[in-house]
Amino acid sequence: MKPVKVGICGLGTVGSGTFNILQENAEEITRRVGRSIVVEQIGARRDNPTCDTTDIDITRDIFDVANNPEVDIIVELIGGTSVARELVLTAIENGKHIVTANKALIAEYGNEIFEKAQAKGVMVAFEAAVAGGIPIIKTLREGLSSNKIEWLAGIINGTGNFIMTEMSEKGRAFDDVLKEAQELGYAEADPTFDVEGIDAAHKLTILASIAYGIPLQFEKTYTEGISRITAEDVSFAQEMGYAIKHLGIARRTKAGVELRVHPTLISKKALLANVNGVMNAVMVKGDAVGPTLTYGAGAGALPTGSSVVADIIDVARTLTADPTNRVPHLAFQADQLSDEAILPMDEIECGFFLNMTIQDRAGVLANITQILSTNGISIESVIQREREGSDLVPLVVMTHDVKERNMNAAIAAIEALPDVAGAVQRIRVENLA
């Protein structure tokens, strides 16, 4: 059979990893596919010294690749959304299959892209868009296809997990660890996407759509970052037997689907509590299989390149298959996606960890517990410590499950008390069993 010809757009970290895996593992890949996969052309603004592209046609205009009649598969690794969207739609219009690692592109424009791809009979593969080298999309879309997915929860941003691990293990402050993460190359100069949860929200949007057969709805994903987490929060959580992790959580309920990214207290005994450093992990609970965990490197040239090449192999294997018999982009047939409601955050129930600073005087705790009770909030445990030489002391309250709107009302009332100093820190608590 004739070789499958690939055009790579973008030769940065992931692009170089993808190219080098295709070159170095060419013999093994050919054995798996039944025909060779060759890089026909590369579109990149500059060369990458880690890649030997001596015999490769290189263009500085990525649209040359999308319009090259010799290319069968376009590998989009340029990042961003505006140019990437135009590139992908151009390639689809030209009848080319797509492989991408671009989570923002899929989360925000995937519905449009998949519709165009289906109309043209081409495939869009995006395993590398979520959790780097971990095959979580294949796991959800294929390995767990016989299950109703009850919930999934994941550590899907390595930068945030590195920061929370350092704060937990060494008692360091957020700003101090963030600076180190930037020096090590884990965080960008502008770390907003990572530390404020936007990157994780893109990924959660994709996972939830595959898990529940719903359209991609990034704009409805609740997103909260870790920049307000303090060393004191971490210390109190540990004292109570919990770890703080930045999680993406999707859960199906009778009222609709929960989609949320936020700092979360989970038991130290939970598997996800022991995923540290820059590693990623996703826990999925299916009705038949029960809880499963996938774990591995969530970023990097070779781990992410591994997922990109696996997608290229999948596409190459099915090039001669009838388009109606291929695995659907979002696991469910396109005309069978559900209009199931996405729950507003106010309607979601969970436990809460509240950390506040109060005046050390009689009656303050009673006023706070009265506010919680008025809002239907039951207390699980309380920690109050003295600070030598100060009449301001920390108070930590753990609650049982309550609706978010009740907690919002209670926090507003507590912050209005004259004996409460500053804002109340609140972190949600999850039982991932």
Image: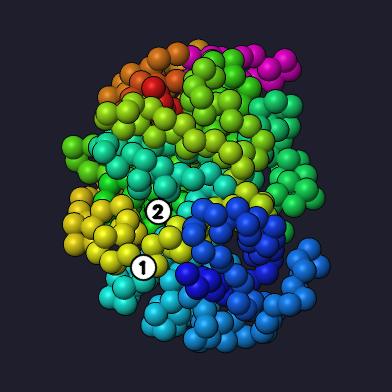
- Answer left or right for 8 relative to 105: right
Number of numbered tags placed on the structure image: 2
Q: Which residue is mark 2?
A: 206
- Answer left or right for 344 relative to 397: left
- Around disc 1, counting alpha carbons within 10 Å, would you say few (fewer than 14), some (14 to 19), or many (20 or more)? few
Quadrant location, the C terminus: top left
Residue at image position (26%, 53%) is: 332
- Image coords of residue 162 (percent x, y): 66, 39
- Image coords of residue 48 (percent x, y): 76, 69
Decide: is 302 above or below 229: below
Badge 2 marks a residue whose secondary structure is helix
- Answer left or right for 30 relative to 127: right
Foreground of the two, 416 or 183: 183
Which badge, 1 or 2, comes first in the chain's sequence?
2
Badge 1 marks a residue whose secondary structure is loop
Instruction: Name the image colouring.
Output: rainbow
Foreground of the two, 359 or 57: 57
Which residues are the magenta region?
382-397
Q: Is residue 286 at least partly visible in the picture?
A: yes
* Amino acid marked by disc 1: Thr
Residue at image position (40%, 15%) is: 380
Q: Which mark is residue 353?
A: none
Q: CA distance from mark 1 to mark 2?
A: 27 Å
Q: Which residue is mark 1?
A: 320
To which quarter of the image does residue 18 belong?
bottom right
Residue at image position (45%, 58%) is: 314
Q: Is residue 179 at least partly visible in the picture?
A: no
Decide: is 18 above or below 201: below
- Answer left or right for 305 relative to 182: left
